Image: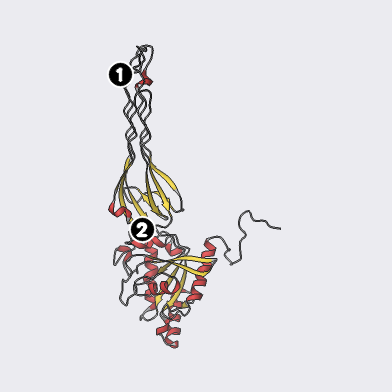
Amino acid sequence: MKFLDQAKIYIRSGNGGAGSVSFRREKFIPNGGPDGGDGGRGGDVWIEAAEGLNTLIDFRYQQHFKAATGAHGQGRQMHGGKGEDVVLRVPVGTQVLDEDKETVLLDMDTAGQRVKLLTGGNGGWGNVHFKGPINQAPRHANPGQEGQEKWVWLRLKLIADIGLAGLPNAGKSTFLAAASAARPKIADYPFTTLVPNLGMVDLSPTERFVIADIPGLIAGASEGAGLGTRFLGHVERSASLIHLIDGTQEDVAEAYHVIRAELEAYGEGLADKVEILALNKVDALTPEAREEKAAELEAVAGRRPMLVSGVSGEGVPELLRAAWAEVRKTRGEVDADGDAVAPAGAWAP
């Protein structure tokens, strides 16, 4: 399935049905009076966060969504029915933005969340509402109220517990394949990954979390170089970041600085997230080269990087355990010291 993380759509609620102009006509009732019914309400436009969806591709082929007009009123005071609603089913994590593409109107971050975007117009009154002692036979009724219309942007931000960051060809896709059942495209050239990939990590039946692999960043990405920072929004909600450094490149310190600079330029709190630093592809390094590269990273980052290899699997379980510890802190299962936190309302002696 093609990945699409943003789409512009037009939405419109239904018009209200018109009221009816009608008079009672029955045998032996010569002056039955007005009996026109009211029009029905127009349909509403709803948006719902649905599980099982991870792309906005459905909105690539249909951009206009219009709710139905309410049924018109009829004689014998028969009111029109309500117009059929339109329900937009979007992936969890979708944001609804105004036409300026900056103002966030809604954040659909909970499965099953359902919000009304536009309300249908009210139905018009039939002529029965306008009868009185002076005007006993009104020959007019109200038209239905116009519906609302709007252009909005849908922007998907994948909900992942851990985000993978690194330069192109840092081995992120290989690591994701080693850590989960995901099978992203893997090749020995930069920019193999063009769209985000999600992988579910199963450490045990009760220890599960989601990793998001985003396309690699390069220097100047915040200004539009390469694929830019368009996909960084998919790791904004993550508990922490795994920063992978290619251990086979010459200057690992420069690679670290490039990614950190782009995270800070992007903003949205990415630079403030807990970062788990890892030196990748250590299977291709000699013991002396491993120590040398790790020392260079420690000097610039202020902490010892973990040594991993997505190809051989070396260090992968330890790195995933470190990531799981950060996920548990974000979920409120443990405190900052790693001690278990009792759930709210739990019994305590």
Q: Quadrant of residue 155 in the image?
A: bottom left
Q: Is residue 131 above or below residue 58?
A: above
The residue wearing badge 1 is 139
Q: Mark number for residue 50?
A: none
Residue at position x 42%, y 82% in the image: 282
Query: 79 and 250: which one is in front?
Result: 79
> Is label 2 in contact with label 1 (beta carbons under 8 Å)?
no
The amino acid beneath tag 2 is Thr
Q: Secondary structure at mark 1?
A: loop
**Mark 2: which secondary structure?**
loop
Looking at the image, the residue that sits furthest to the front is: 27
Q: Position of residue 15 (x, y in %)?
A: 32, 35
- From the image, tell me which residue sits under label 2: 55
Q: Residue at x 31, y 53 (%)?
A: 59
Q: Amino acid at mark 1?
A: Arg
* In the image, residue 220 above or below residue 43: below
Q: Quadrant of residue 85?
A: top left
Residue 216 in the image: x percent, y percent?
35, 69
Q: CA distance from mark 2 to mark 1?
A: 53 Å
